Image: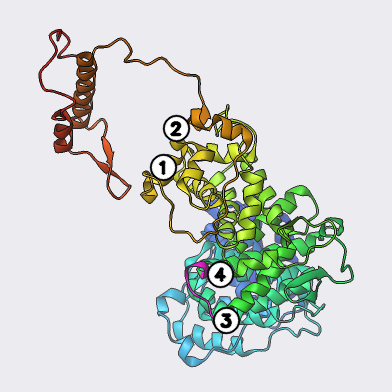
Amino acid sequence: MTMKMDLNVIIDQMETGEQDVALKALQSYNKEMNLCFTFSREEEQNREHLGELVIGFLNRELQPSCQLACLETVRILTRDKQCLDPFINRSAMSTLARYAGIAVAITATSVGSHPQGQVDGEGGDGEAAEEDSSEMVKESSPSSENPDQDVIAEALKSICNILLHNETGQVVAGDLQLIKGLAKRLKQCHDSTWTHEVRFFDLRLTFLLTALKTDIRSQLTQNLHGISLLGNQLDSILGLSWPDTLETARAGLEGIPPEELPPLSRQQTELTMEILKILFNITFDTTRRKVDEEEAAEYRHLGAILRHCLMSYADGEERTEEFHSHVVNLLGNLPLPCLDVLLIPKVQQGSIEYMGVNMDAVNMLLGFMEKKLDRGHKLKESLLPSLNLLTESARIHRETRKFLRSKVLPPLRDVINRPEVGSALRNKIVRLMTHIDTDVKDCAAEFLFVLCKESVSRFIKYTGYGNAAGLLAARGLLGGGRDSGNYSEDEDSETEEYREAKAHINPITGVVEEEQPNPLEGMTEEQKEYEAMKLVKMFDKLSRTNLIQPMQLGMDGKMTEMTTEDMQKLSHNPLFPSQEPVNSDSEGET
């Protein structure tokens, strides 16, 4: 009851229209509600009314302290997704955009191009709202020479809340071209005027717009040159220098190995991760379409920055892992031919060299992938981005494939333990090949298959036919052979241990097994034929009741269903005559 009375008192004080009275009331409300994120249903109408009053105040000439208090109240009220009506009409959104410094002039055509019902506020006159909105949008944004950045930050936070909770607000934000205002300020990445908070919420709002609106994604990428714009942001935040084409270093610390560089600051990491998330949104489809030379150059430049991020550390292991996760996610969106930037840096002292190529980045990716694998938590979300990235890198870069194979599939010596048993990286990945999640098992199998140059015999050698069957069946390769990948013709080296045991290895399990007694030993030929016929009948009965679906290997190497006719052909096989043996007491037992 106390809270309700307080809110009514605040509304009464706001309705006086006096700035000093309103300021005192709002400051009291903001202090009490600053950490409140859940709201009672009983006060919904009062909160909506307070929101209308605050927006009305913001459309007047206010002293800076009153502007800030009003916007803090809007930020608190917009946390409640049930009470957003005062804030999602065009007039209110324009007001907030103006205070955020991201309002742009809107032409008459674009203002009138959307249905009235989508953007008008509750109880407002449509024409008046639009006219008022146009006037507001054309007003100048806060000057970047001496802006009140606390006011800007509060307005940005409020818009973020609105977009997060309300689809109409998202539509209005698109109508008002907020992305253009954001892009204009993002270009000022070298301007030290802006505080960390303003820069962060500029990026957070850009992320929300690109995550929620596909048309804004395209607009930022194509019209506003989002890749280079955000790449420049990364360059500035990370303090990069470019000692050579597509080679990065930290300015003032050139020549120092990555592991010896100081970690990135908390603010650098926060801003960088927001940019990486935006870039992920706007590059989501690049692997599925062709890019021209100009785009490829942009992506390669971005790839070089991502390599630098991959080799950098944040403050603390947990933050570093989160940071690297965003880097890996974005690397997976780059056009595949552009991934060669991971291998471009020259080999330096302390670098991991393989075939004359710097493998530091690939080794870092492999270590990151194994860490996610060992953790075993939400493998589909956490493991697959890095595993897919390694698979595609290995598919198109011979040096990467051979390096990864040396780490994951070294020459086979253990022929006693099954491929899925053990703590080596090969054992861990083979275990994934029978994972309950289809995406996880397919991705694990694909990775090993590529490392085996898509050779069926080599794949079976390292995984066992039982583990490999799923991928081979899907590819139509159960009969052997090689898929259509383009690989060099180097030979698979065999260790002495493998060569000696090769003839005794069970191809299904991939290991040498103790010789088992022959279950048919001691049977006459007639008894063997009877047992075979009995087995066929059992399969036929289970098939007819739909408990199982017998399969057979087709001429194309793929598994196909066995029909009743196929089963009958088996029963008429000359090896299985139709007459029963003399001792047929158990004929009906199946």
Examine the rendered structure and indicate whether residue 193 appears above or below residue 475.
Answer: below
Q: Which residue is mark 4?
A: 283
Q: Are marks 1 and 2 in contact (CB under 8 Å)?
A: no
Side (left or right) of 393 relative to 239: left
Question: Relative to 110, does residue 272 appear above or below in the rendering?
Answer: above
Residue position for label 2: 508
Please state which of the two labelled residues, at mark 4 or mark 3, is closer to the viewer: 3
In the rendered image, which residue does mark 3 sit on? 293
Crowdedness near tag 4: few (<14), some (14–19) or many (≥20) residues, C-alpha within 10 Å: many
Picture quarter containing residue 154?
bottom right
Distance from the alpha carbon under mark 4 to that under mark 2: 42 Å
User: 422 left or right of 41?
Assistant: right
Q: Quadrant of the C terminus?
A: top left
SS assignment at label 1: helix
Q: Secondary structure at mark 2?
A: loop
Give the CA separation, mark 3 to mark 1. Answer: 39 Å
Which stretch appears magenta? 286-294
Along the viewing direction, whichever of 17 and 420 lies nearer the viewer: 420
Viewer-closest of 376 and 196: 376
The Cα–Cα distance between marks 4 and 1, rounded to whole angstroms, is: 32 Å
Separation of residues labelled 1 and 2 (CA atoms):
13 Å
